[in-house]
Image: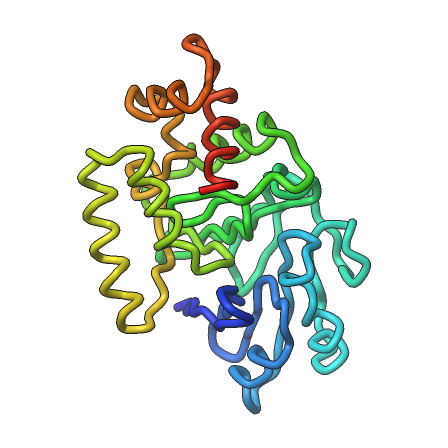
Amino acid sequence: MITISPIPAFNDNYIWHIEQGSEHWVVDPGDARPAIETLGSRTLTGILVTHHHFDHTGGIAELAERYRCPVIGPESIELVTQPVKDGDRLTVLGCETTVMAVPGHTLDHIAFLFRTPEGLHLFCGDTLFAAGCGRLFEGSPEQMYTSLETLRQLPAETLVYCAHEYTQANLAFAAAVEPENPAIQHRQEETKVLRAQKKATLPSNIQLEIETNPFLRCNTADVRAQAIRRGAAEQASAVEIFATLRQWKDTF
């Protein structure tokens, strides 16, 4: 059985530790120290990386040198030893893993979808967050909206492992967009309890995101109405609604 657990790094990053038997992989190691401390006397089998930002790549050099392990990710990252692109299929820890291009936050952003006997596991970096999405540093609103819609189409039970503990702040924004949404209110209460206990609010799942994430709800009446109140045109497309929400969130 595969075990997946978060390794906290910096103020709010998670390095995901995937293990099965004697195999150990990490996803987006922005800092080597927490990963090394977690591994202890065990060795690292490999590294997966979703995009080039330093808080996701800063620990790669030290880990790769220490453990002599492969680094799988976008070809734009110099330390990657096995570049991958959209549609590539890998075997990681004995599981079929599909690479998905999800640009928007960055142009090189990818996600890894694991198929395990226990279900589907999505490692999506900074594209899809719990109740939110990444800022548009390089891509366009259309690119990010398309990427999120691609992830939205995954099976409802797919577990979502994003790279930051942003859930409380994202839910505060979601509640501003849809103050009458009971699913958001319930998730806020659950998240408050978890954070009070210093527990991670992740993983999420696709169904929960569809119910509570405003960036996956651009076609719903209440979300459209709020975006129009924030300046979107009455006949705005879903992409234009998304762009208005993202601009609002940037200054929320």
Q: From the image, which quarter does the N terminus lie in?
A: bottom left
Instruction: State the residue lying farthest toward the bottom.
Output: 41
Residue 103: % across, % down:
63, 38
6 or 46, nearer to the observer: 6
Residue 25: % across, % down:
57, 69
Residue 154: % across, % down:
42, 37
Q: From the image, which quarter does the C terminus lie in?
A: top left
49 or 104, nearer to the observer: 104
Residue 157: % across, % down:
32, 45
Q: Tell me the residue at 75%/52% (across/down).
A: 83
| Res 79 → quadrant | bottom right
55 or 174, nearer to the observer: 174
Q: Tell me the residue at 43%/69% (across/down).
A: 5
189 or 93, nearer to the observer: 189
Q: Tell me the residue at 21%/45% (across/down).
A: 185
**Relative to 36, 148 lies left or right:** left
